[in-house]
Amino acid sequence: MKKAIYQSVRPFSKSLLLLATLGMVMGCQAIKDIANVKPFDGIVYKLNYQPAKTQVQGLVLDAKTNEPLQIPVKVAILGKDAGRTITFAGKAQTAYTAPKGDLFIGLKGTEPTVSAPAELRVVVNADGYVASSINLALTKSLNSPFTIRLVKLSATPAGVAAQTATATTSTSGALTANKVIDVTVPATATALALPMSVSLSANTVMKDDKGQPVKGNVTASVVAYSGQSQDALQTFPGGLSAPVVKNAQGASNVTGRFAPVSFVSIEIRNSSGQIVSTFSQPVTVQMSVPSGVYNPQTKQALKNSDNLEVYSYNENTGEWTYERTVSVRQQGSSLVADVPITHLSGYALTTERPADACSSTFKIANLPANYSYIADLIVYEGSNQDQALVLERTGSLSGDQFALTLDNSQRYEVAILDPLSGNVIGRSGKFTNACSGGASAAGTITITPPANKINANFTVRAVCENGKNIEVYPTTTVYYQEAGSNSSVKAGVTFVDGKGTLTGLTPNTNYTASVYYEGVFTENFNSGAADSDRTLTYVLKNNVSVCNQ
């Protein structure tokens, strides 16, 4: 028998109408009310679903493959507005395990604005990966999606290298012999090789975060990152504009930018799963300083006796804090910096963080409707400030403005990329003294989107895994790219009530549209010769209220 489909429930009880229509329109309240819907046989109910008026979605990617993780991801949400967050299922949770590398964050209460943003810090980790995080400032109801790139220990991206080693400790947790762990980041087309070593002395007592000795056979994992590699910089925990709990001057909760020479993540654990937290005496991490590394404070290459700052990263909270200042020294024909550490975390060796950081807003002119884009923040280094390095690449952005954290020490340029081709479609021009008017002068970027493109109007609908006769039309992010592409650049657009448009398509070209919800649901299609209408269907789990009846 053919099922009748009802967009409205007016032919039925008034109470059902109130719950199924008003309830769904009222956002969070719908999560409770919709549980009272009792679908009748032979009728399909079509319902819009948005757990919270304010939301953001994100992907946790493997840094080498650029694909979302397909294993469980541990998530912790912190920051000023963490207590307002809910999951896609409507649950108020700030610590949970996501089944896959796709995240949804809803925000209850007042809608944020540019002048009063909601501030969140999302910390993620997964087995076999190095933990990382991102700091989010939500400024509207539907925010641009974010990405967090995790480094896999067994398959690192360019600019990153990993090494494991074993050692033995006594019943008191004391190391039975000296141990040196060497790791070298291979050279790339844009970065020199970066040797690094971790030296532990015999009789060093290692304890966990409860003060208990870590005894027996232990395995140390050392992951080294090059600050001269654009790929490695995209994996920097928290992003290069991450705030610090304390800076070198003792100020608290300071915004700014990192300019890392290198970064290292170290983990030591025994076969019982105990993880080392502290050492009884300093362990020395020796980081090489490749020749020619630019020091924005001196406007020349780093040299013997220059000072560098050391910051530690807390993998549980996603927070950076100042540890100490060290001097660069000559060792043979190379420059090195010796970093003594007494507790385990990530460590960044960086040029001095300027105290004059600011958030600068850039506006996009000539932006087509529904068009998304990518922004690259480029820094120009070298004695003539003419050596370009991409410091930061945003995710897919929507709307005609976005903000970047800058400082006065660097020469910058902002490039706007087409999200499908990766081609540059607009530039700000180079500017200095960003926080003293330089960024404002370059603040409007006129773009030239690709010509002769077409659109695909999509409807995204969700059905219930348990077979309930309900169709859900969610407010969600749809990602799309050319079929078979493995690019880190992806277009993303937010659909409202299941409706949206994929723009900038090349005629007669194969594309893949994807929705991520505890996995990926895709629609492969050929764009054809003209604008078209299409549908993408995915499946909701039973923990979503509309399906759990």
Image (cartoon, rainbow, N blue to C red):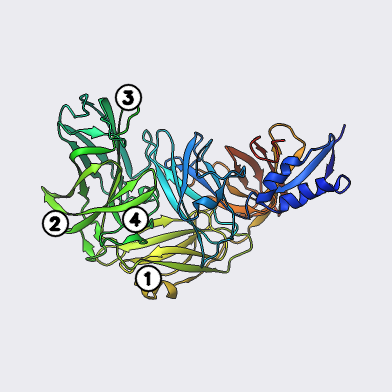
Nearest the camera: 380 or 81?
81
The residue carrying mark 1 is 434
First in residue order: circle 3 vs circle 1: 3
The kind of residue tagged 3 is: Ser
Q: Secondary structure at mark 3?
A: loop
The residue carrying mark 2 is 304
Estimate the x, y position of residue 170 in percent, counting from the top left: 20, 24
CA gap, disc 3 to disc 4?
Answer: 33 Å
CA gap, disc 2 to disc 3?
Answer: 42 Å
Task: Judge depth for marks 2 and 3 and give the one in front.
Answer: 3
Is 220 positioned to the left or the right of 334 in the image?
right
Label for residue 271?
A: 3
First in residue order: circle 3 vs circle 4: 4
The residue carrying mark 4 is 245
CA gap, disc 2 to disc 1?
Answer: 29 Å
CA gap, disc 3 to disc 1?
Answer: 51 Å
First in residue order: circle 2 vs circle 1: 2
Q: Secondary structure at mark 2?
A: loop
